[in-house]
Image (tube, rainbow, N blue to C red):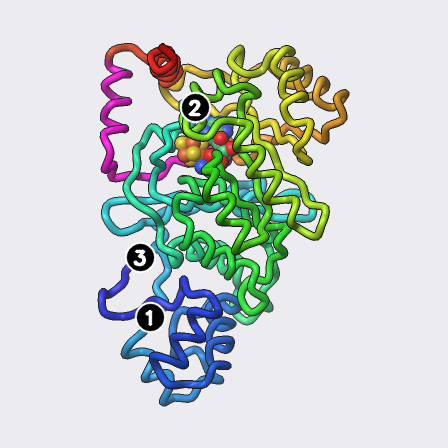
Amino acid sequence: MTQSTQKINLLGMGLSSLERFFTEELGEKRFRAIQVLKWIHQRGVDNFDDMTDVSMALREKLKLVAEIAAPEVTFKQYSTDGTRKWVMKMPGGNAVETVYIPEEGRGTLCISSQIGCALDCSFCSTGKQGFNRDLTSAEIIGQLWVAARSWDEPGKKRERHVTNVVMMGMGEPLLNFDNVVESMGLMMEDNAYGLSKRRVTLSTSGVVPRIYDLAEVSDVSLALSLHAPNDALRNELVPINRKYGIAETLNAVNAYFERLPDKRVCTIEYTMMNHINDSEELANELALVLRDTPCKINLIPFNPFPNSGYERPSNNRMHRFKDILQQAGYNVTIRKTRGDDIDAACGQLIGQVSDKTRRSEKFIEAVELGHTAAMVATKRNDRSSL
Ligand code: SAH
Ligand code: SF4
């Protein structure tokens, strides 16, 4: 994002922030916020001169104090199956990936919330790259802004290609709470992208206190990355489980959905790894553990990355697992791995992280010693259970 330090970036401001800006900072009327919001998000404009229903005087005033600075796209790839991928450069030697996946009747955009991730799940390539910083709300909504205008043809009416957004790119969205909430507000705002709350999904590995906080301020859809039916295994795969165990996490999720007036349910994500979490016993255990949580289950075939030490299970094993859950009465899908040809499957997003932790370095050291991510996770778990 090429952004000057003095000017305020309007791209990441939700309706109420923008209204405050116009009334309190500029002494203008409130309705200006809606006008400008529409220009930015519905028409993809990043230049005040294009805002023809805004008076010349106000446009000049805006140019002095404000800007609409979107992330800089350094690479884009549009695949033959309709999948699109962008690499967006973020200041400080970082980049994130954003992916668009079209399916029958809908188009899903997978968005990042942080540069890297501090949580270090053993099977996740983002975790191995360490962590740099939170994305700003402009950098989060900027990913949708870039995607939404990528179909634009001069003079043609804008069609809606992105119908769904999932916060399933890089990062743990609940650890970047305020910026994620502000940008999700824009996704659902009628004067911006107007997506339904059913079609905006926040995916979390289970930051329990923040799930309760989210219930106070938002009603987006929620997905929980579970990946294991018992604490021993989940501690190994998803280290935050040592802080907030499965029972506590499911209680928070249940509370989140109980207060919603509609009949939405939680999406349970379960990344399937060969002979790690895909046995029949574990399928039965999962069916038991989820009995009090209204949910649908999404089985995600593991997406390999170098030196992970994990493999994707055979189709047979995945279907056996699915069948057991279905027989127990659950709604289960196996996620299609789309966009493999451009390396753009969700959960496989590889940005560029200027790591501030020692995590990426440690991972490289472990690999040099002949270890894999899976081996490191097992050892770590053995040690902590002593
Ligand atoms: N941090 C959040 C959201 C980003 S990860 C979370 O963990 O939910 C988005 C999803 O991709 C999660 O369900 C995550 O477990 C999954 N994922 C991560 N690495 C993966 C891999 N290598 N293969 C398949 N799914 C993966
Ligand atoms: Fe972070 Fe999610 Fe990856 Fe875990 S799976 S390391 S929480 S991005």
Residue occupying the point 51% across, 49% down: 214
Q: Is residue 206 left or right of residue 297?
A: left
Q: Is residue 69 above or below residue 229?
A: below
Q: Give the x, y percent position of residue 171.
A: 40, 40
Residue 97 to residue 58: above or below: above
Disc 3 vs disc 2: which is toward the camera? Answer: 2
Q: Give the residue drawn at x 53%, y 14%.
A: 274
N-terminal-most mark, 3 or 1: 3
Specify the amino acid type for callout 3. Met
Q: CA distance from mark 2 to mark 1?
A: 40 Å
The magenta span reads: 345-368
Residue at (56% x, 27% y) in the render: 270
Q: Nearer the viewer, residue 209 or 106?
A: 209
Mark 3 neighbour density, 10 Å: few (under 14) some (14–19) many (20 or more): some
Residue that mark 3 sits on: 1
In what element is the residue under mark 2?
A: loop
Q: Label 1: how many residues lie within 10 Å, few (<14), some (14-19) or many (20+)?
A: some
Q: Quadrant of the C terminus?
A: top left
Answer yes or no: disc 2 within 8 Å of ligand 1: yes
**Which residue type does callout 1 highlight?**
Glu
Give yes or no for contact between labels 3 and 2 (Cβ–Cβ under 8 Å): no
Residue 24 position within the rendered picture, expressed as x and y whole percent measured from the top left: 37, 80
Instruction: Report which residue position mark 2 lands on.
Output: 123
| Residue 82 picture quarter | top right
Check disc 1 and report the residue beneath it.
67
**Towards the viewer: 339 or 27:** 27
Tell me where residue 68 appears, x and y as whole percent: 36, 67
Q: Nearer the viewer, residue 221 or 76?
A: 221
